[in-house]
Amino acid sequence: MSSLDDWNHSFCGSQSEMNTWKGKLLTDVPFGHVLIVSGKVKPNPNKICLDLTDNIKGQNESETVYLKIEANFRENQIIRSMFMPGEGWQQEEISKNWKADGPKNPLLPGQTFTFRIAVLQKCFEIYINDNLYGAFEFVKFPKPINFLMVYGDFEKITQFHQRMLFPLVFPRSLICAEKIAFQSDVPKKYEVGTVVAMECIAKGPSNTAFSICFQCNDTGRVVLKFHVNFETTTVSRTYERSDNSFSSDDEETDGEFPFQRGKLFKIAFGIGDKAFIIAVNGQYFTYYNYPVRTFAISTLKCFTNKVGDFAVKNLEYHCDSPLLARVEKLSLI
């Protein structure tokens, strides 16, 4: 058995003990697109792996893996490889940092990290913590990439973006990360029929609060602010006015309070003809009429107050129909 097979066998045996984060992409990942994922490393890590894959089976097993990046802390290495069904693991590359004076594994225990993977004509170009690390050539163009999966010794994932850098930059307005618990943007606007499904958990004292916001690419303003306040047990929906302010006059607060601190929940936002359709844990929750006639949403961001801790465990983009039944189904944990 090769070293990579040995690693894969031993890793799969302990994968259930590690964190797993899955992101389903909204659209294809052609030439000129870049995928970005950020998070925080645990204090005493062994490995963190990232897969770009076409499908994820029931036991969080990838089928075709177009690119695997493994940050191995014990051996201080970054390993790249790919997996094809019927052919096995191929093209293993170990610690080829293009910066001769750079570290073999730039990830540090207890610190934040960022992977940026740009899709070029003949290879993936890999950036780690905003520095070019290297490239990984592919024999044929990797299509389709439907999922990005991260697993291993990380505490949480805080960013998941798919952006278009060529021939145009989209989205044009990229948001500030201050006080943001999680953010994700895509390289096209949400069309009618799009569903964004998020598996999340909120922790903290009784006055914990968090918000899930959807931002217009053209204006930078928030089209929907979905705010959950555990102290008042209210869920408010509002939007950002043209003067960049929020007003209590615009808030809607009717409805039940389906959230519990420290308990996993799944929420789905559907883009309808005239309104957002929202479901929580498999049940229809409410709708929210669009505050403006025309907008192009391409970014969501999640905030938490100073005392709270909010994490997105999984994120999926879907674009099928019919909408209402799918929103409820996709909000099932």
Image (cartoon, rainbow, N blue to C red):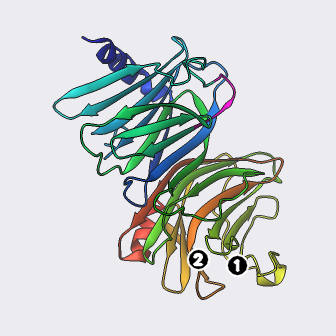
Q: In the rendering, which numbered label is found on residue 100?
A: none
The percent position of residue 102, horizontal first and vertical second, equals 60, 20
Q: Residue at x 81, y 51 (%)?
A: 206
Looking at the image, is mark 2 or mark 1 earlier in the sequence?
Answer: 1
280 lies left or right of 8: right
When asked about the image quadrant of residue 228, the answer is bottom right
Q: Residue at 36%, 77% (x, y): give it.
A: 322
The magenta stretch is 108-114
Numbered disc 1: secondary structure: loop
Amino acid beneath label 1: Asp
Q: Position of residue 269 (x, y in %)?
A: 53, 68
**Mark 2 highlights which residue?**
286
User: Which one is in front, 288 or 208?
Assistant: 288
Which percent across, then down, holds residue 7? 37, 16
- Taking 76 as reference, is 24 left or right? left
Q: Counting other residues with Cα less than 10 Å from the Cα at mark 1, is it few (<14), some (14-19), or many (20 or more)? A: few
Q: Which residue is denoted by mark 1 in the rendering?
A: 254
